Amino acid sequence: MLSEKIVGIDIGGTKISIGILVNGKIEQFVKLETPADGTKEEVMQQIVKGIESLEGYEDAAGIGIGAPGLIDEKEGVIFSVTNIPSWREVHLKSYLEDHFKKPVYITNDANCFAIGVKIYGEGQPFKNVICLALGTGVGAGVVIDGYLYSGEVAGAGEVGGLPYLDADFETYCSGKFFKQINKVDGQTVFEKAQQNDPEALKMFAEFGRHVGNLIKTTIFMMAPEAVIVGGSVSNSYEFWKDAMMESVQEFPYKKVIENFQVLKTEMNDIAVIGAAALFKNRYEQDMAKAQASKAI
């Protein structure tokens, strides 16, 4: 029987976060510095060091990993991580599987966010859901029929790069909207909105309309049951939610959005939880495929 204990790892340019999770709950956690200027072997050795620092890692069913960038999920190869210069083609899956003798699954961090929310968070009631991480940029992940859909090199769902107005959706639906379009600090606007400043509230309303247009685009593409938003900009959700929903309600095919929902995730530590969820989802998917092939 598969152990419910899973190692979840989030690899960032400055920190590597590692947790041991049981049924989606973090039982142990460690955060290490990323040796970003080191060789790719030194970064991988730091990951091994972090895993082995956690008591009971030997009993885990396997390892799930989220990392930035493009990833060959089948082979477990990470390509070109911006903040880790030596990581240009890293065969992390085979390295860790050889070391720990356990299955390893890897995808990008936005996909981990999506499957984490689907399995352990607000996405549980839905089979088909899109998750949008609105922060310094726009990340997105797609779940179809209960399973994460990644596409080629884990690049599916990256709607932030779609052209929009004079730029793209990422420019208008992330922190860039405040910094680049309005030349203001987003945190300052948030604090002013909390004081009912009319200009700050107006800016958030405009932001909400842009996010609503992004969500309508995802509905045209995928017609999901729900879109779930997270990321640092979602902390101000209360100030742009209504404008966003007004925009969503303008979708022309009303039957499509009759039961459609937009939710904000309240999950903490979603990066590590999502990495563990990735392992669970992919392992179950592989087992289902194996059973189906036996039945043929």
Image (tube, grey):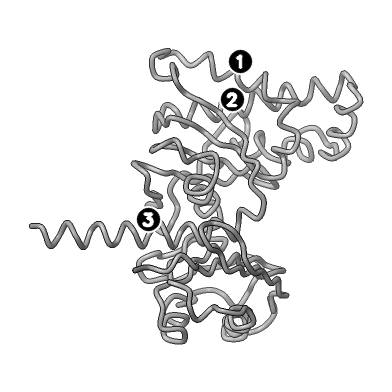
What secondary structure is found at the residue carrying circle 2? helix
- Position in image of residue 55 (x %, y %): 61, 80
Query: In the rendering, which numbered label is found on residue 246?
Result: 1
Density class for disc 3 (Cα within 10 Å; few <14, some 14-19, many ≥20) is few
The part of the image, by quadrant, that contains residue 214 is: top right
- Position in image of residue 292 (x %, y %): 17, 56
Query: In the rendering, which numbered label is found on residue 162?
Result: none
Q: Which of marks 2 and 3 is nearer the N terminus?
A: 3
Q: Which mark lies nearer to you, 2 or 3? A: 2
Amino acid on which disc 3 is placed: Glu
| Proximity of marks 1 and 2: CB atoms separated by less than 8 Å | yes
Residue occupying the far front of the picture: 1
Query: In the rendering, which numbered label is found on residue 152?
Result: 3
The part of the image, by quadrant, that contains residue 166 is: top right
What secondary structure is found at the residue carrying circle 3? helix
| Proximity of marks 2 and 3: CB atoms separated by less than 8 Å | no
Residue occupying the far left of the picture: 296
Q: Which mark lies nearer to you, 1 or 3? A: 1
Q: In this view, does 187 lie above or below 165?
A: below
- Position in image of residue 65 (x %, y %): 52, 66
Residue at position x 37%, y 44% in the image: 146
Q: Mark 2 points at which residue?
A: 212
Left of 58 or right of it: where is 206?
Answer: right
Amino acid on which disc 2 is placed: Gly
Q: Quadrant of the C terminus?
A: bottom left
Amino acid on which disc 1 is placed: Glu
- Position in image of residue 64 (x %, y %): 49, 66
Q: Which of marks 1 and 3 is nearer the N terminus?
A: 3
Residue at position x 69%, y 75% in the image: 34
Q: Considering depth in this image, is 237 or 92 the residue closer to the camera?
A: 237
Q: How far apart are marks 2 and 3 (CA)?
A: 27 Å
